[in-house]
Image (spheres, rainbow, N blue to C red):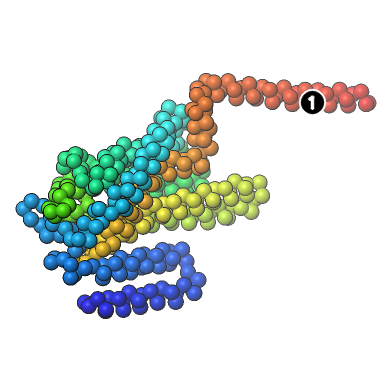
Amino acid sequence: MSISHRLNTSSQASQILLLSSSVNMTFDQHWMKLIALLACFELGLSNKSGHGDDVYSFRGLTGNETAEGVEVSKTAQMILRSRLTTVFLPIVYIVVFAVGLPTNAMAIWVFLFRTKKKHPAAIYMANLALSDLLFVIWTPLKIAYHFNGNNWIYGEGLCKVLVGFFYGNMYCSIFFITCISVQRYWAIVHPLSQNRRNNQLAVGVCGAIWVGVWLLTTPLYLYDQTVRVTNPDLYIITCHDVTRPSQNNMASGYFLTMGIVGFVFPAIVCVVAYVLMLKALRETMTDPSITNNRHRAVVLIITVLVMFLVCFTPSNIMLFVHYSLLLVELDNNGYGFYITTLCLASLNSCLDPFVYYFISEEFRDHVKNTLRCRSDRTVKRMKVSFSALKFSKKSSTYTSESGNTQSSS
């Protein structure tokens, strides 16, 4: 297929998308439009590869495989040396580590030692916080790797662990957020369901998710993640950035399957659950006594859904596009955009604790008491004292009013 034909195809797709913007579209149609735009953008980038500069085609970050490693193209060298990968990405991961480590550690502390009455949502959120914490504690290695010019010096084993925890966290987060969505819908539609049975179900589901994600990430440990770049002016060892041509099919098949199993299906369940929740809440807004609470619940639902889509949708769309181009050996210069969206997905690890804070009033109270170094016993004494003071004020008010009534009579 010629470059001009590809450009014409991309321009025709863009014109169709522009014409469709004048039509009232549903939420799903807007996301389909975004996916198409990103695909056209990536394909447009792929048309600009420098065939005249390279003796071999440039597919993702791969190149000409030799006995020592892989000799990458000039474009790949530019990406591996760019400020995007050596400055911007490590700074974002520093923010993720600095915010995610203390907030997720505190969230786990609250769920384990402060929350006395366990319920399914708390169980799912505790597992989500644990998943985020397991990812965050490995980010210093990723920060050092990028600051070191994308040169991995910690061995193949640690690289596999880092990659496994990165993708394991992403898909664990997606599954646990999906479980929280379904549980919140169930709590709204069936508020009188048996809590003990639901807790047992939640524990079983969490166990199944941990085992399932561990099994799904096992293939990442079965092939080399470190690749030596053999270019004379860029002699480094990369971690998961450069793919050996001999491993293209395996890597592409694996990540395309993970994208469908780990994102597409959970995203559909999550969106359906939130839409049904909004529908159920809208039907109960006729009661003025609960209208304000329902409005707050709607805002929280929309916030969580938007955060989910913003963090995970771009990275998984670009994952599909990147590995599809890698699989069919189409030239692709959009790798920088791809790794940026993966970095965006990691921000979810430091945003989740703030979601707990705004969703759960009980969690907010426990966090405030923990920051103020108040024990549970102290909090209970304060509540008893406050209730006694409030009761005494009411009693004194009632006594004074009774005395005034008797004197007037």
Which residue is outermost to the left?
67
Q: Residue at x 25, y 53 (%)?
A: 81
Measuring from the top left, give residue 298's x and y in whole percent: 54, 51
- Which quadrant would residue 203 be assigned to in this image? top left
Image-based side of 203 in relation to 54, left or right: right
- Which quadrant would residue 218 be assigned to in this image? top left
Q: Residues within 10 Å of mark 1 (few under 14, many from 20)?
A: few
Image-based side of 45 in relation to 101, left or right: left
Label 1 element class: helix
Q: In this rendering, does residue 175 appear at all?
A: no
Q: Is residue 261 above or below residue 51?
A: above
Q: Quadrant of the C terminus?
A: top right
What's the amino acid at mark 1? Tyr
Q: Residue at x 19, y 54 (%)?
A: 242
Image-based side of 339 in relation to 374, left or right: left
Q: Residue at x 16, y 42 (%)?
A: 156
Which residue is outermost to the right?
409
Q: Residue at x 46, y 49 (%)?
A: 304
Q: Is residue 262 above or below residue 387?
A: below
Measuring from the top left, give residue 40's x and y in whole percent: 33, 69
Measuring from the top left, give residue 180's x and y in whole percent: 42, 45
Q: Is residue 298 above or below residue 108?
A: below
Measuring from the top left, give residue 195's x and y in whole percent: 45, 37
**How many marks can you see?**
1
Which residue is outermost to the front?
233
Q: Quadrant of the N terminus?
A: bottom left
Q: Identify the residue position indicated by label 1 in the image.
A: 398
Q: In this rendering, does residue 341 appear at all?
A: yes
Q: Nearer the viewer, residue 65 or 231?
A: 231
